[in-house]
């Protein structure tokens, strides 16, 4: 098992999901971790973006971008990819950690950039958010689901969307912009294109064609933005998640499934389903209902 915090998660935390395959193949992961008093951790470069929700305890965190701060219960912190930090637990407590690639839709990112152009952050300002009533209940539910082992990668994506709905409903645009900070500014145009268009593409070739990059340039840009995973493998993982999500809907039929997946023919859907699950769409629907 690989540790992404430079500490042994089996000894220092509970309910961790640091299985190498799950971590690398998922765009978002929730974890419920317990840190004992005196525990220390350090990393030279975070491999993804992180949101830390402090449920209890007291923790000292020093970030290369923002200096040293004490974080307590009911505070939320966002750490952008490539951050360098060290931390020490002063009082034992629980933390829910969200590991993610891209936090916002292309429309949301454009909106944030528009805000930054009119009220620019001339100096990076470290900013946490205080959980309101709704946000506290959200993280209580997440903790319950993880402890009850009732989670999945698809559920993580749903809960991640729910988190941002709460964020946009209860906090101002200025608060959100400062909270997300460099995790917004660090999103490349190429990444925004990928996350905004992959769900409408029938295959990887179509996604490449619509990007206006040559195949070689697309693969190069993809490697720069998505590390070691290949474009085809990443695309298949996303399509697999889409099939599982749509196939689990009540009263779903193969024909309705085809429409919701934005596929132009039953033969295309059958081929994809065979490639991803080695079964027909009807059999996949039956398996998911069971």
Image (spheres, grey):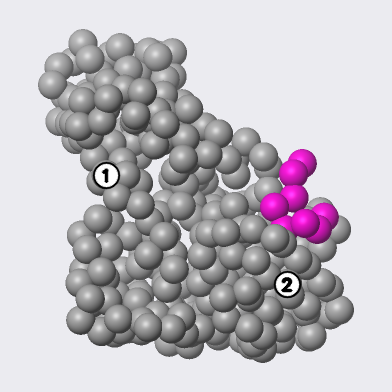
Examine the image and state in which quarter residue 33 appears: bottom right
Identify the residue under disc 1.
Answer: 193
Residue 227 lies left or right of residue 202; in this view the side is right
Quadrant occupied by the C terminus: top left
The residue positioned 80% from the left and 58% from the top of the image is: 7
Q: Which mark is residue 86?
A: 2
Identify the secondary structure beneath mark 1: helix
Residue 276 lies left or right of residue 96; in this view the side is left
The residue positioned 36% from the left and 81% from the top of the image is: 121
Q: What span is in magenta?
A: 1-8
Quadrant occupied by the N terminus: top right
Answer whether residue 244 is magenta in the image: no
Q: Which one is nearer the viewer's eye here, 156 or 255?
A: 156
Tell me if residue 4 comes above or below residue 53 in the rendering: above
Answer whether residue 6 is magenta in the image: yes
Q: Pointer 2: residues within 10 angstroms few (<14), some, or many (20+)?
A: some
Identify the secondary structure beneath mark 2: strand
Report x, y in % for residue 142. Answer: 53, 65
Tell me if residue 145 comes above or below residue 155 in the rendering: below
């Amino acid at each position: 098992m690989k540790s992404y915090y430079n500490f042994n998660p089996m000894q220092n935390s509970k309910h961790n999901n640091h299985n190498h395959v799950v971590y690398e193949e998922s765009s978002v992961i929730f974890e419920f971790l317990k840190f004992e008093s005196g525990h220390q951790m350090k990393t030279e470069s975070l491999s993804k973006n992180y949101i830390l929700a402090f449920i209890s305890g007291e923790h000292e965190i020093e970030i290369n971008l923002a200096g040293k701060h004490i974080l307590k219960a009911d505070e939320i912190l966002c750490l952008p990819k490539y951050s360098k930090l060290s931390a020490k637990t002063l009082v034992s407590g629980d933390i829910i950690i969200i590991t993610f690639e891209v936090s916002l839709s292309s429309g949301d990112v454009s909106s944030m950039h528009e805000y930054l152009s009119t009220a620019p952050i001339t100096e990076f300002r470290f900013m946490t958010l205080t959980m309101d009533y709704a946000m506290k209940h959200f993280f209580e539910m997440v903790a319950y689901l993880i402890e009850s082992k009732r989670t999945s990668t698809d559920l993580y994506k749903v809960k991640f969307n729910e988190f941002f709905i709460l964020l946009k409903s209860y906090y101002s645009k200025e608060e959100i912009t400062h909270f997300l900070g460099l995790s917004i500014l660090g999103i490349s145009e190429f990444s925004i294109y990928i996350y905004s268009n992959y769900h409408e593409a029938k295959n990887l070739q179509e996604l490449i064609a619509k990007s206006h990059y040559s195949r070689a340039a697309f693969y190069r840009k993809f490697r720069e933005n998505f590390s070691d995973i290949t474009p085809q493998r990443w695309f298949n993982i996303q399509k697999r998640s889409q099939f599982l999500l749509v196939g689990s809907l009540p009263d779903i039929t193969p024909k309705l499934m085809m429409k919701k997946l934005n596929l132009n023919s039953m033969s295309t859907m059958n081929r994809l389903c065979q490639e991803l699950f080695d079964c027909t769409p009807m059999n996949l629907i039956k398996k998911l209902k069971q």
